[in-house]
Amino acid sequence: MANSNLTSAKKAKNDEFYTQYHDIEKEINAYLEYNPDVFKNKTILMPCDDPEWSNFTKFFAQNFTRFGLKKLISTSFAPDSKPYKNGYQPSLFEVNDPQNDEYKTIKNGKIFTLTKDKSGDGKIDVDDLEWSYLKGDGDFNSAEIKKLRDEADIIITNPPFSLFRDFLAWIVDADKQFLIIGNMNATTYKEVFPLIKENLMWFGPSISSGDREFQVPDNYPLDAAGWRVDEGGKKYLRIKGVRWFTNLDHGRRHQPLELMTSSDNFRFNKKLIGRKAYDKYVNYDALEIPFTGAIPKDYEGEMGVPITFLDKYSPEQFTIIGSNLTHGIPMSEVAQKGTYAQGGPSFYTDNGDGTYKRIYTRILIKHKK
């Protein structure tokens, strides 16, 4: 994506969020518990961050020795940096002056690297970070950042939500291990879902419900619910539907769900008490499962489950078949126009009065035998 488009996406969609230190720590610790050597002798690249602000850089620099890292690289995109002092607007001549380091951040991103103890205090941490300007602006699609990507073993960052699919494709193209943050609805993207279906990507272990708080830039408009300003004047927003996306293995994805028989579900599950059977889709042969806790253990056919199922998905227990975006007969071939809500591909259930209910995004699964 062109640099101008990247800047426009950030401004238009207001998706420049800074991940909290404790959220990073909780997620990373889960991988270490499963495999203590997961980061040993690895080079980690963290693009899409301003290393001067990034909690990713801070966390991994502080734990460089404990994790046994080989190298840490963090880069920033130039427009994310702070180009002006005291509100002063430089002239075009000043900006283009190659000798003018004061305003170089307007056109050049930064790169921070950490490999060894430089401060002489006997430990490797934030004080040993070395930095310089990049030759370009730090766009992840630039040849300069692609070279760093190819050098790295693992890519870890919080990319702008509006560029999630582009950034993920950039990682997959290089066949790298990764851990990135995005909105869970990204699972429905045609570029993303196949990776999940083929077990090439899955949700991380530390977030499975609720929302998460992110710091936002000082100029971010606080016109949505769930915001606060701390005593230091920093702004925060709570974002719903956030998930970690990764191909790093962790223990939770190998823990099978505890399931009940259909009859037990209807007798003991508060949300299902009083029902006698599951609905079936009228345009596809599968059961409609309204929430993950309602999955029966005694059904051998295909079932449609919400995308939140992926929080508890075990590849040893279930097979992912597809989704409402890839399966299902068009409703125009099943029912008369006006009896159902139109839209993109979806599953429908019978309301019993000649009309049909459009079901929200569903993933098709089946028990493994």
Image (spheres, rainbow, N blue to C red):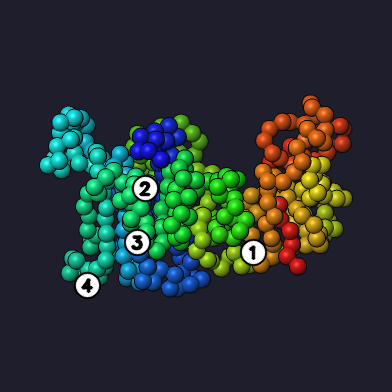
Precedes in sequence: disc 4 or disc 3: 4
Residue 105: percent from left, percent from top: 23, 42
**Can the viewer see residue 180 in this picture?**
no
Whole-number angstrom distance, CA of label 2 to CA of label 3: 14 Å
Look at the numbered discs 4 and 3 and tell me whether their residues touch, using CB distance below 8 Å: no
Q: Which mark is residue 122?
A: 4
Residue at 30% in and 51% down = 144
Precedes in sequence: disc 4 or disc 2: 4
Considering depth in this image, is 344 or 210 the residue closer to the camera?
A: 344
Identify which amino acid the numbered label 1 is placed on. Pro
Residue at 87% in and 32% down = 353
Query: Which dot, 4 or 2, sits closer to the camera?
Result: 2
Residue indicated by mark 1: 315
For label 3, the crowd category at 10 Å Cα-Cα, with few meaning under 14, some 14 to 19 and many 20 or more, is: some
Considering depth in this image, is 336 or 354 the residue closer to the camera?
A: 336
Look at the numbered discs 1 and 4 and tell me whether their residues touch, using CB distance below 8 Å: no
Residue indicated by mark 3: 151
Residue extending furthest top? 338
Whole-number angstrom distance, CA of label 1 to CA of label 4: 44 Å
Residue indicated by mark 2: 140
Quadrant placement of the N terminus? top left
Precedes in sequence: disc 2 or disc 3: 2
Q: Secondary structure at mark 1?
A: loop
Whole-number angstrom distance, CA of label 1 to CA of label 2: 32 Å
Residue 218: percent from left, percent from top: 34, 37
- 32 w.r.t. 187: above or below: below
Considering depth in this image, is 331 or 81 the residue closer to the camera?
A: 331
Q: Secondary structure at mark 2?
A: loop
Precedes in sequence: disc 1 or disc 4: 4
Query: Which dot, 1 or 4, sits closer to the camera?
Result: 1
